[in-house]
Image (tube, coloured by chain):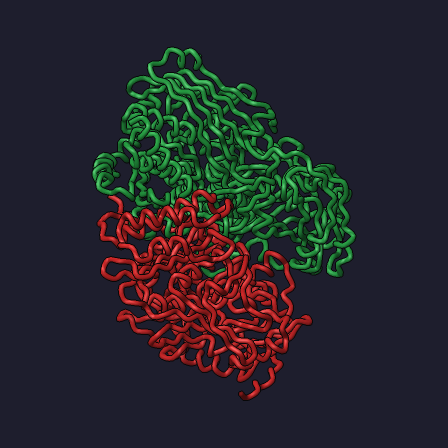
């Protein structure tokens, strides 16, 4: 069972590595942690709603807003004509209008905004527009897009060796197709922004975002302002998961455009349905593979096509699909390999970042291939997975040319295989299934190897700003954002450790573009790696300054000045940190410092997709056990055992939370959560009544999490490892346990045809299919 | 028949976090959530979905009890609960939970200690659902905790630490959390624990109760809350265009999702006669305004096999607000109570003015969300015949998610078996037609035959072909047909003595 963490008292003095509570935990529980929509509204705040396209694709023949404007509660409408700058929120390509002009490209695409004196009035009025849209043919699926060669970005191919030759000469060969679905972020707090006009045309934006700097840029571009005219602030998000890396820009820009036009503060909060219809999601993928392998299931050659639904615009689809390519090896050596990546343009909402950023889809492909290989050979899939793992000195170069220096997967898997009693449980399940005609159980172990760093190399930098006040309290600001992942807590721990003060002395202030400029998004699991290092840099500067001051004051060597537990020791003098801070202030010592960090070692050629895009890898593995009902396809996750590599944890309680939460979110993607578009391209699952994320009941009582517990070999912040995204992919163990259970419904050797999400309907179809095929092949 | 006394025009009086309030000037169709956030700046209560599916808006109501207990403590969804419907009740939001003197309530302390929040947006809703559990159970089993949390979504934690908090909250000294009305509602021996504060609260509420029909008027819209059937009938006859509303668990969405103006509203939740469950030798009569929680508890007493289906009906907060009469009158093809009531042979008693009539439930529906209800007519009660000896019954729900989901297929199968033969068969189905339906052809294929595998299989084939369901986001038509037939096979296995697991819920891990 789960061993409880040692009580916090066991860590007295050691702030880094202690399982301290999230810095807002008490506020959360008391309902006193303000989110953007909770902030007091400035006098005269208007409420904004969006008018959206009902059509997936159409020419805009006319937008008549007279009925909207006639509503007595309506103060203004904003259309493309009201945009002084650029009508675009595309983060890389410029193909993502704030308001559609000439043509609408997905059902739910905003056409205009309406500002009224109340939220309900604005939403009611937005429906009064008379839209004259002329339908155009719509491309809704990956298959339609592939057939039409409809792409948001050109296809990308990564090859090593000669996959075709390896396939031609292989002793065994298999090919097939499988799909994984998209996923809505379902952050509990929907997209929201409050724009407040400031003097000289400036704009202050409160917004729920993972990337305040992006909001600053987009608002500046739309309003034709310089970056120093726009300030963006975010204290916390009610969840992000990638959904607030770019998707908030449109919301913030619409609010800012209203604020500019009316001179009044303006707030736009999307309701759940609008949020789900009009903002991007995880990319759905189609995978086609042709694999060559030997008698032991070792892959000799692989030709793999990854085709994703990107929606109508590029958004972050380039780097997301790149990352899918980079993770199509997962933890496995692929000698001769050709990976083809197609970024399909469809008339659906533009898909975007979502925890894992393409990595989960890449891994989905290779885990599927290996499971197929194992079943074709009649072997335990774990044996085939192990046979294909990267080596440590040979067989250790990725298809994109990066040598893996930190491979712990073989060791980690062996440890989990033993601790989770994988073999014994597999045997017991086999016996049990023989006597159970209706309910079948399955088990699987899958690994994760996830590359840490932004593939956009310039994003791998961070800044911090640290103040020491004359009462000895500290205020730290950094470029990262808090979406629940505990970044602020970890950064505070780092600063408290460095300055030798109690954690309570350190306050982290809201992310703010006027404090740390040009900050990267909080994404790619990099938050504490980057900002922790930047904050440490600032803290070290201040500590050195204070040590030098103390050495002068108390006539000792600065080297021997110690800071610990809120007390400073300088030679034979001991005094409270606050006292030293006051003295330093009186002696006119600067008590503010900036810190900076840039990730070393990484380099990457975007053109050839080769180099060392990742500073290091985070590893993990999970064993999952499931049961399925062969009459209905209903299924249940019975047990989860996880061994995950967080390096030397900065905060084991927070890291455990990321692992558990990531797994369950991944399970939702693979098992439950189905985005369903009708044949007109309208998303019909746009609220929790129809879109089902996991609930408490879906999480098994047996949910064991352990840390691999080895410090990062790279010099990361306190040798920790990034933990935000990698655990999501541990849920592939659950999906493969489902496949195992479905296979058991026949003779265990017929590979199931199961797409994700594995809804009850898909599981039942897969059961009927394996039974039919087993009967045919006798 | 004495004429009902005229309505009394009055403000809405209730207790908010212990303080009496009298609301005027706010439109009757304002939701409780909008009132809390926009009018009272109590922003701890969040909007996550505005349809009662995520629980971020959960608050706890203390309502006058029904004998034995002074108050009932019930989590509800503020996002679709209409503000006027809390008149005469005490509303507690997350802001009231921690004692004013400082510190944390045990549910909050447990959440913090278990690392039960990450982004925190859902946390106040979880705290209030846990507070509801704290008032209604002592150290409940894990399944009861999951049930209590079925209406609360968390996207960050994966729930493990929240369930751990629910288990740990009983270990924390209630005195640390201020005691009084905040204290546990159930003692260690299972008896109801009533603090002096709670008694005082009940007295305060009793003083707020309107003696006669409340008429609340604002924004050119009226809200009547009659207290007798007589008064209700009179209002509906006088104002046939007025809309009946009870828990608003569906009507609330017309406001939040469709921005509809509902016009004048008549609230049934304060009509004492409609809020009662009566048991007679021939039937169980469940008043139209009885909360689903209470209606299901009453049904489960005679039909324990149905308990799982009821636990999977929406969530605790929805079952606390929604009413059986509302579920019946609303006539949704996927309302989960209806297939069960059809299989159990229920009737509905309707009233218009002084005239009443009793209609078999299967005759009540005439089309998609259409019923035989005439203008000014309302549902008085649902009558469920007493359980015949030899009855075999199961209710099966198939949906994408186990908890708090809308059925792709729902089937309730009831057989009366005597001497190995099927004396009577009734099957109610949901999700397979425009209205909840009985499977008449399948029933005919069962009636009079021996209850054995062959009969079940033959009937399953009939059932697979009996309906023409649609493809939608919940399931394909083909899946619905296949599963419906397989549910009959499952029913046979479960009632025919085969000792094999038939439910994934029965399986434990190695």
Residue shown at the point (65%, 45%) measured from the top left: A54
Closer-to-camera residue (B194/A337): A337
Q: x, y percentage for residue B253?
A: 56, 59
Q: How many marks?
A: 0
* Chain A as rendered: colour: green
Observer-nearest residue: A223 or B308?
B308
Q: Which corner quadrant of the image does residue B341 belong to? A: bottom left
Name the residue furthest front.
B448
Kindly indicate the quadrant of the structure image that contains residue A740: top left
The residue lying toward the viewer, choosing from A135 and B458, is B458
From this view, report whether residue A611 is shown above or below residue B108.
above
Q: Can residue B88 be seen in the rendering of this structure?
A: yes
| For residue A582, side relative to residue B191 (left or right) | right
Q: Position of residue A680 (x, y in %)?
A: 60, 40
Return the residue nearer the eye: A424 or A243: A424
Q: Position of residue B292 (x, y in %)?
A: 43, 66
For this orientation, the residue located farthest to the bottom is B2
Q: Quadrant of the C terminus of chain A?
A: top left
Is residue A564 at least partly visible in the picture? no
Where is A442 relative to B57, above or below? above
Report the residue at 52% width, 75% height from top: B351
Q: Colour of chain B?
A: red
Residue A597, placed above or below residue A167: below
Query: Percent x, y for residue A343?
Result: 56, 28
């Amino acid at each position: 069972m789960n061993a409880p963490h040692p009580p916090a008292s066991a860590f007295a003095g050691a702030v880094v590595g202690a399982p301290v509570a999230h810095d807002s935990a008490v506020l959360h529980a008391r309902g006193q942690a303000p989110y953007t929509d909770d902030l007091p509204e400035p006098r005269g705040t208007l409420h904004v709603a969006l008018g959206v396209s009902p059509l997936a694709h159409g020419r805009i023949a006319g937008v008549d807003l007279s009925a909207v404007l006639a509503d007595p509660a309506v103060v203004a409408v904003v259309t493309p004509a009201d945009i002084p700058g650029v009508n675009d929120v595309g983060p890389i390509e410029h193909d993502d209008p704030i308001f559609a002009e000439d043509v609408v490209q997905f059902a739910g695409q905003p056409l205009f905004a309406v500002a009224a004196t109340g939220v309900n009035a604005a939403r009611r009025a937005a429906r009064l527009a008379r839209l004259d849209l002329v339908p155009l043919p719509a491309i809704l699926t990956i298959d339609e897009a592939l057939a039409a060669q409809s792409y948001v970005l050109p296809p990308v191919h990564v090859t090593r060796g000669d996959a075709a030759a390896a396939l031609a000469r292989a002793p065994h060969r298999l090919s097939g197709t499988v799909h994984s679905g998209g996923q809505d972020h379902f952050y509990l707090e929907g997209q929201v922004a409050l724009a407040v006009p400031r003097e000289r045309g400036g704009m202050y934006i409160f917004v729920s975002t993972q990337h305040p700097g992006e909001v600053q840029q987009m608002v500046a571009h739309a309003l034709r302002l310089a970056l120093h005219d726009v300030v963006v602030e975010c204290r916390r998000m009610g969840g992000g998961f990638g959904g607030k890396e770019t998707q908030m820009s449109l919301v913030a820009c619409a609010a800012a455009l209203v604020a500019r036009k009316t001179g009044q503060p303006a707030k736009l909060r999307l309701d759940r349905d609008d949020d789900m219809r009009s903002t991007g999601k995880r990319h759905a993928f189609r995978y086609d593979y042709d694999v060559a392998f030997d008698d032991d299931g070792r892959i000799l050659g692989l030709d793999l096509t990854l085709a994703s639904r990107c929606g109508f615009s590029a958004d972050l689809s380039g780097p997301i699909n790149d990352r899918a390519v980079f993770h199509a090896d997962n933890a496995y050596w692929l000698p001769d390999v050709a990976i083809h990546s197609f970024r399909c343009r469809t008339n659906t909402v533009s898909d975007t970042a979502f925890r894992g950023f393409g990595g989960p889809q890449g891994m989905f492909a290779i885990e599927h291939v290996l499971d197929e290989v194992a079943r074709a050979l009649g072997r335990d899939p774990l044996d085939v997975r192990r046979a294909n793992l990267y080596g440590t000195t040979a067989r250790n170069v990725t298809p994109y040319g990066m040598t893996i220096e930190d491979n712990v997967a073989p060791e980690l898997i062996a440890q989990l295989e033993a601790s989770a009693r994988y073999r014994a449980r597999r045997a017991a399940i086999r016996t049990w299934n023989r006597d159970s005609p209706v309910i079948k159980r399955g088990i699987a172990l899958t690994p994760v190897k996830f590359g840490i760093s932004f593939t956009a190399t310039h994003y791998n930098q961070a800044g911090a700003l640290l103040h020491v006040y004359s009462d000895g309290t500290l205020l730290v600001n950094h470029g990262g954002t808090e979406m629940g992942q505990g970044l602020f807590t970890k950064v505070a721990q780092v600063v408290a450790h460095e300055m030798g003060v109690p954690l309570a002395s350190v306050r982290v202030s809201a992310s703010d573009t006027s404090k740390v400029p040009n900050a990267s998004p909080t994404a790619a699991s990099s938050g504490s790696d980057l900002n922790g290092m930047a904050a440490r840099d600032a803290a070290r500067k201040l500590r050195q300054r204070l040590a030098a001051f103390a050495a002068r004051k108390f006539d000792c060597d600065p080297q021997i000045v110690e800071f610990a537990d809120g007390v400073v020791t300088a030679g034979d003098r001991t005094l409270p940190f606050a006292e030293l801070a006051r003295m330093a202030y009186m002696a006119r010592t600067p008590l503010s410092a900036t810190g900076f960090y840039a990730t070393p070692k990484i380099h990457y050629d975007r053109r050839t997709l080769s180099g060392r895009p990742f500073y290091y890898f985070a590893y993990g593995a999970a064993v999952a056990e499931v049961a399925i009902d062969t009459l209905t396809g209903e299924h249940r996750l019975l047990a989860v055992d996880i061994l995950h590599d967080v390096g030397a944890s900065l905060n084991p309680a927070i890291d455990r939370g990321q692992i558990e939460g990531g797994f369950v979110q991944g399970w939702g993607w693979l098992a439950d959560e189905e985005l369903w578009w009708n044949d007109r391209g309208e998303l019909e699952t746009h609220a929790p009544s129809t879109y089902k994320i996991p609930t408490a009941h879906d999480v098994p009582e047996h949910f064991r999490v352990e840390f691999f517990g080895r410090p990062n070999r790279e010099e990361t912040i306190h040798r920790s490892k990034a933990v935000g995204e990698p655990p999501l992919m541990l849920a592939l163990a659950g999906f493969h346990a489902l496949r195992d259970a479905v296979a058991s419904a026949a003779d265990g050797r017929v590979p199931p045809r199961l797409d994700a999400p594995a809804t009850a309907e898909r599981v039942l179809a897969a059961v009927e299919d394996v039974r039919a095929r087993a009967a045919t092949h006798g | 028949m004495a004429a009902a006394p005229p309505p009394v025009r009055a403000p809405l009086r209730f207790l908010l976090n212990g303080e009496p309030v009298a609301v005027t000037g706010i439109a009757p169709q304002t939701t409780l959530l909008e009132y809390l956030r926009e009018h009272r700046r109590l922003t701890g209560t969040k909007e996550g979905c505005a349809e009662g599916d995520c629980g971020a808006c959960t608050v706890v109501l203390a309502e006058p009890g029904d004998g034995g207990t002074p108050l009932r403590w019930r989590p509800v969804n503020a996002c679709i609960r209409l503000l006027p419907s809390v008149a005469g009740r005490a509303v507690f939001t997350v802001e009231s939970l921690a004692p004013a003197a400082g510190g944390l309530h045990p549910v909050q302390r447990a959440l913090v200690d278990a690392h039960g929040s990450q982004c925190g947006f859902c946390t106040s809703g979880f705290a209030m659902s846990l507070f509801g559990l704290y008032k209604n159970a002592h150290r409940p089993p894990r399944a009861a905790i999951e049930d209590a949390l079925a209406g609360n979504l968390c996207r960050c934690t994966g729930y493990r630490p929240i369930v751990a908090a629910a288990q740990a909250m009983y270990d924390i000294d209630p005195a640390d959390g201020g005691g009084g009305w905040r204290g546990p509602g159930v003692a260690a021996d299972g008896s109801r624990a009533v603090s002096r504060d709670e008694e005082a609260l009940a007295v305060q509420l009793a003083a707020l109760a309107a003696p006669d029909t409340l008429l609340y008027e604002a924004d050119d819209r009226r809200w009547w809350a009659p207290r007798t059937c007589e008064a209700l009938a009179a209002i509906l006859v006088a104002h046939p265009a007025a809309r009946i509303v009870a828990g608003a668990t569906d009507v609330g969405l017309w406001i939040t999702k469709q921005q509809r103006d509902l016009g004048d509203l008549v609230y049934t939740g304060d009509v004492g006669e409609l809020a009662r469950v009566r048991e007679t030798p021939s039937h169980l009569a469940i008043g139209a305004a009885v909360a689903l929680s209470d209606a299901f508890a009453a049904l489960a007493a005679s039909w324990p096999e149905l308990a799982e289906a009821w636990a999977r009906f929406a969530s605790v907060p929805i079952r606390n607000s929604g009413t059986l009469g509302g579920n019946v009158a609303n006539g949704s093809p996927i309302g989960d109570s209806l297939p069960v009531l059809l299989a159990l042979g229920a009737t509905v008693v309707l009233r218009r003015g002084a005239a009443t009539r009793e209609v078999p439930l299967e005759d009540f529906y005439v089309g998609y969300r259409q019923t035989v209800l005439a203008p000014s007519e309302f549902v008085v009660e649902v009558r469920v015949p007493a359980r015949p000896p030899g009855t075999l019954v199961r209710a099966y729900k198939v949906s994408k998610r186990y908890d708090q989901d809308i059925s792709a297929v729902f089937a309730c199968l009831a057989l009366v078996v005597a001497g190995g033969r099927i004396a009577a068969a009734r099957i109610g189905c949901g999700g397979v037609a425009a209205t909840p339906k009985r499977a008449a052809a399948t029933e005919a294929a069962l009636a009079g035959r021996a209850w054995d595998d062959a009969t079940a299989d033959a009937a399953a084939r009939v059932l697979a072909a009996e309906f023409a369901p649609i493809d939608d986001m919940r399931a394909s038509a083909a899946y619905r047909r296949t599963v419906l037939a397989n549910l009959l096979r499952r029913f046979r296995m479960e009632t025919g003595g085969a000792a094999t697991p038939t439910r994934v819920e029965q399986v434990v891990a190695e």
